[in-house]
Amino acid sequence: MTKNKIQRVIAIVLVIASVVLAVLGAVNLPKRDAQEGKDIIEALRIRTLLNATGDGVVESYVAIAKKEAQAAAKAAGGGMKAIRAAVAKAEEETRAKYENTTTDYSTLDTAALEDAVAAYAAQLEPYYAVTVAAEEAYIAEHLAEAEAKAEAERQAKIDAGQEVGEEEKVEVDMSGFVATEEMTALLAKADEAFNGVGEALKGIYPVLDDSALATLKDTISSVVFQRGDSFTVQYDRYVAAGSGSAVANGTSAFLIRYADDLLYGALALVVAAAVVLFYELLCKKLGIPRIIIGLFFILLCFMSLWYDLDLSTLLSNSLVRMGMNSIMVLAMVPGIQCGISLNLGLPIGLVAGLIGGLVTIELGVPGAWGFLLAIVVGVIIAAVAGWLYAQLLNRLKGEEMSVTTYVGFSIVSLMCIAWLVLPFTSLKLRWPMGTGLRNTIGLDSTNFKHILDDFLAFDIGSFTVPTGLMLFMLLCCFIVWLFTRSKTGVAMQAVGNNPRFAEATGINVDKMRVIGTVLSTVLGAVGILVYSQSYGFMQLYTAPRQMGFIAASAILIGGASTSRCKISHVLIGTFLFQGVLTLGMPVANVLVPGSTISETLRILISNGIILYALTKSGGDSRA
Amino acid sequence: MRKIDWRSILRNNAVTVMFVALCVLCLAYSGQSLSFVMYELFGRLSRNAFIVLALIIPIVAGMGINFAITIGAMAAQIAVLWVIEWGISGLPGMALAALMTVPLAAFFGFLIGKLLNKMKGQEMIGGLILGYFANGLYQLLFLFIFGNLIPLNAPGLVIKGSTGVANTIDLSTTRGFKYALDGLWQVSFADAALVMLVALLIALALRLVVKKNAVIRVSCSVLLTFAACLVSAIAPQLGLTLPMAIVSGVILLMFTIMLGGADFKLQKPLIYLGVLAVCTAIVRIPAVASLFAMVKVPMATFMVVGVLCLFNTALLKTRIGQQFRAVGQNRTVANASGINVDKVRVIAIMISTVLAGWGQLIFVQNMGSFQTYGAHEQVGLYAGAAILVGGASIRKATNGQALLGCILFHLLFIVAPNAGKNLFGDAAIGEYFRVFISYGVIALALVMHAWSGVQKKKKADEALKS
């Protein structure tokens, strides 16, 4: 068989498997809301209930036995010691007797209980629905108040000179929440229904008395129905409680539970089949690293679906992270096009942008104007620094990469000293005690926090579209694209492609390289401001050191090489890279809880792709 | 006599001269006692010199500073982890770790070399990024494989409730090998100087036995030298004051040079010997001796460093050493003359990686514990900066430059924080300053190298035109 044929066979097998999965999924998914799904849940629920109450029943037996033993010992006239020994012995014996006996559930007549529980569940469901609605209304009413309070606390912390950590979501204090009349009425009805359940349980476990039932009430109600329950949540809860054996036909229940995952699996197999079928084409068009990372991204998407993570929120987050990083990645474009290769000296621009941001906060310019001021100041500084940097690079053509890296590192550590001695006075920036600026400077609503993210942002379900951020990103990309189409831009690309040829046609090579370097540095300054407004913090000191690498790896993932790139590489690369990182963290946390594996992932991807690009950039010859 | 061109010497050693000035300045403002600085310096020298020397061979082979030595350090740390797990302590543990490092580091070095062969001309940036990449793999290994998939039983290696190997690995417990090498033979500084003197004398005598020409003259000079040494060594006991000791030492030294001078080959070692003799005398004088009062010289460690120096020198004289040089000077010419350039480069990196691993072992046995996830990260940076400070470039490096650089660089590391505190009122400034210096020195060296390359090319172009 030729390779081609094998490919086809594998693809066909995959497609068939996919169809099987899809049919299974499509058939079983609607069953969740149909009678079959309800039956499964009910069977599981009854079993879990019996298990849970069974524990309570043992306690009841123990209590009775203890009482009897105590009475008997007293009657026999023993001292305190004898009574205590007798009680302990009775407890031990009773526990041994009941705890190790497994109830034979098939002999129990649970018909009455089933009806009662169904009635109880039917009452609990509207109660929780009303409660959730009432609470949401309360939260909406008091949110502004809570935010103001949190902001005041933050400010107090800043004034006291404490480190202000990442801002958590504002929580509304629920202690003032009072149940509405509707809720009380529904709760009363539910309680009535619970009495029915109690009676039914008494029918099964005669030993249960009213007081035992009262202590079991919370357990029972949490078994029967919890807030926000759905088919899958209930199923998982009951199975985790060890009631899986209650379902008569395990396989079909399993299929119904995982019907959505079957559908996702089918989709994944189709993707796999397509990849197998068009492997050569993809390789040629995209290159192996991009295929690997692209597939990895898709795999992460499916895994987050399988693990019931909120994919749309995750994708929304990746979109935000794409937006916040994109301008820094865009900064790579002029650098590559003018022939200085990957501008790993990007921190020069980043530092300039940070100074712009600091100036804005120092002067206290609020909102959009503040952001604009930050950009203007940052761009001016970046332009000057970039020009000097370009003069240096023009003197060492051909060896830019290692030089730019270490020049960038040097600037970052030089700026570490500068952050300590720069004469900013605002307490938002400085440590109240000690010298120098804070490590991370928290932005808030009086500065330019989320100024782009929140502009015209809207929600589609749990997917938030950061309209302003996206528009700004596209605007910057468009401007750079326009520039590459201009006469200067074309000349610059010519220099990057072939400096000797460009020189021969009368292009001023040095000037073009200066333009490209300055543009790259300036975009870096804008980029870090966009990043900071989205992140909510400006990070000083050593934080900008690695950002040049992250930007460089993003554009390489997008398809650029060290000498060639397009705007589309920026968008694709940033989305893929940030998408993998955003999705990777929650998925990794499911697989290995509490690990830092997603940080490891970032290190591997980011540096791996740069290494790959370096091996492609030359040196294949033996000498 | 040949005229010494001070200007060109200054220009060619600008970095070193600048660094000496910086060290003196910081030393003056640090307010630390000299004896403490000396104590710190010897400690740092003993644990860092080896790894700096590991950089020489790749530089000679034209691959620049091998920033991928971090990977050698990782190999060593893997070996240390397992030696502690097996509970082999003391010198046997250290020896086993060194033995285990060899195949590990050689294998990694082989892979590094293969990769760097695909990016000729960009080895330094490639090595740096490869180091970062390997750090990711190292984290995978230490966080998710060791301690999870492969269980570790030694106490303290795994902390309950957290994933992977503990953040700090302690070698000072009964299972570790803290001071395994350092503790073998520790002497005071004065005695160390004497030991070195005797060692050099014996070496010279051995050389004389091998070479028989001008027997009488040479033996006379040796005898005189010996006398010089003896006088210097026991000067204080004879009740001689400092100037008298120096004068007598110098007079004897001059005789030595006059006699030995005729034999050109012997001139240099004899001068060394004489200088060393005078030094030995000086450190015996109480005022000077107090400077070194706190210093305990770990002789075994320094002997290992000395052996590495000899190894570097000797290796470059062998066939493979000559090939390193040839490849370093011009790959095309080397290839044309039948040298397998790729293979030679891989060998150079392999040697460097193994040596770096041993260097890291020496480092951790001295420190007594290390940060599992951070100890290797800055190894490449500091070693690279140190060798450049000593006057090496990314095309040329010698043992002397490596050692001198190590001394200067670490001297600055000791005094910079305090100097920063006294000058600017903040120790953090000194801390950041020394990091800045590390990066800055490398950036400067790269810029100067690239610049000289461009200048050469321009000159060649002009010559071609005219």
Image: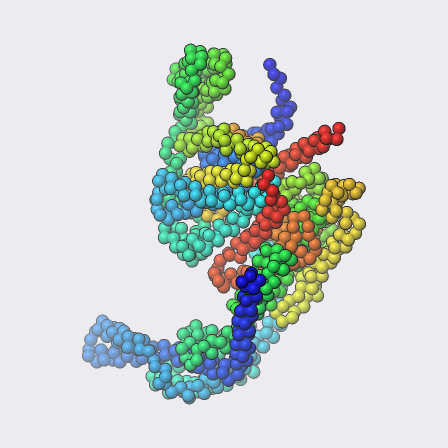
The quadrant of the image that shows the C terminus of chain B is top right
Q: Residue at x 62, y 37 (%)?
A: B446
Q: In this view of the protein, can residue A547 be seen by the observer?
A: no
Question: Is A479 positioned to the left or the right of B349 in the image?
Answer: right
Q: Which residue is drawn at 47% across and 14% down?
A: B260
Query: Which x, y percent locates residue B276?
Result: 46, 21
Colour pattern of the rendering: rainbow
Q: Is residue A439 above or below residue B211?
A: below
Q: In this view, does A515 lie above or below A598?
A: above
Q: Residue at x 80, y 50 (%)?
A: A487
Question: Is A249 positioned to the left or the right of A482 in the image?
Answer: left
Query: Which x, y percent locates residue B237?
Result: 38, 17
Query: Which x, y percent locates residue A512?
Result: 75, 44
Q: In this view, does A120 lie above or below A12?
A: below
For the residue pair B92 and A496, the one nearer the viewer reads as A496
Number of marks drawn: 0
For the residue pair A23 and B278, the one nearer the viewer reads as A23
Q: In this view of the protein, can residue A116 be seen by the observer?
A: yes
Question: Is B40 positioned to the left or the right of A157 in the image?
Answer: left
Q: Residue at x 61, y 57 (%)?
A: A283
Question: Is A310 positioned to the left or the right of B141 in the image?
Answer: right
The quadrant of the image that shows the N terminus of chain B is top right
Query: Which x, y percent locates residue A157?
Result: 58, 56
For the residue pair B39 and B197, the one nearer the viewer reads as B197
